Image (cartoon, rainbow, N blue to C red):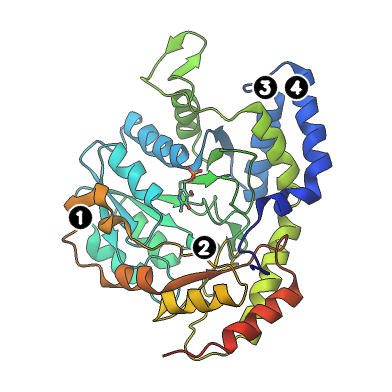
Amino acid sequence: MIKYPFLDLSKVTRPYASELKEACCRVIDSGRYVGGDEVESFERLLADSCGAGYAVGVANGLDALRLILRGYIELGVMSPGDEVIVPSNTYIATVLAVTDMGLKPVFVEPSLATMNIDDTLIEAAVTPKTRAIMTVHLYGQPAYSTIMADVAQRHGLKLIEDNAQAIGASVDGISTGHLGNAAAFSFYPTKNIGAIGDAGAVTTDDRELASAVRALANYGSSRRYHNIYQGYNSRLDTLQAAMLKVRLAHLDEETEGRRAIASVYGECISNPGVILPRELTGRHVWHQYVVRVSDRERFRAYMNDCGVGTDVNYPLPPHRQPCYMEYSGLSLPIADRLAAEVVSLPVNPACTSLDDAREISEIVNNYDYE
Ligand SMILES: Cc1ncc(COP(=O)(O)O)c(C=O)c1O
């Protein structure tokens, strides 16, 4: 029996059920189901929450990434065949966005300490064809540094944030989503703010990019029946915008809940066979609490037997995926090692109390590692 589930989305939404239902009825009664005031007010709230000039709601996080790249292509900043630097241990969506736009991903290894792209390795990966660094705030920890910003600036590269996992994170008081030139958000239901379905957004201070993304997401049209681009249908549903406004209002308290659980793990887990994540590069929002163990499957089986649900984010790095056979010959040992060792512990405050976190820590401490 799983006493401590990894994640139960019905528990995540339960505290907001009446607010969500009220918002849902408001949309149904309004007669406006795509775009409109709900979407516009959500976009304003999101942009303000991270300090960005513009936010554009889109259908999902992958589209947010794709639309940023396509927007830059339309604006002449990059062309198919150009290179985009990405971390080698990211979720597949980061890389899919790059290749889908005909761009070439150049993988840079993460640091073992942060599990984010190793900023000291970025410059060596820059070539005359590099146009952007797509940094991924993996697991909720900002992947940003002055070294990275300096490389981007000196080489004239766009700094694009994959902020799917890190809404609410920040570096020196600047929010993720406003650290680079443009950022992609995902509101997939398991994310720190989840919709009741798929949703995403782009933030930027760049007015031209924001307009291009907005048009591209709406069939490429800037005004009705006038198509300046061969675009897509990737708009944010009115209903999802209304759901997201409810969730955004509670982001800070939820983030504090995640941070409190992470602190309990940090203080209470002392098993030498389990390497704990550390908050090293700004305010971490703990989308995932990812430990490393060398005998992962045995550890997971033990945790499961003790009633603790765990997950693996992610078991196979992009260059090992069957869809990317062309990159399978690359030597990316840190990404491979992380994929073999990472285990995520429960960290959602709606599912895990601080007492649960203490008990889970005790269970981890009793693990007899090899
Ligand atoms: C790092 C990262 N990038 C992009 C995405 C894509 O977001 P979505 O699932 O909303 O398309 C996700 C989440 O799934 C993600 O974790």
**Label of residue 327 in the image:** 1
Give percent across and percent down for residue 215. 47, 23
Q: Which residue is mark 3?
A: 36
Asked if 91 appears above or below 112 in the picture, the reply is above
Q: Is residue 191 visible?
A: yes
The quadrant holding residue 200 is top right
The amino acid marked with disc number 1 is Tyr
- Element class at badge 2: helix
Callout in the foreground (4, 3): 4
Give percent across and percent down for residue 307. 62, 73
Q: CA distance from mark 1 to mark 3?
A: 43 Å
**Label of residue 139 in the image:** 2
Q: CA distance from mark 2 to mark 3?
A: 33 Å
At a point 62% along the width and 48% down the height, the residue shown is 51
Q: Is mark 2 within 8 Å of ligand 1?
A: no
The amino acid marked with disc number 4 is Ile
**Left/right of residue 257 with respect to residue 272 in the rendered view:** right
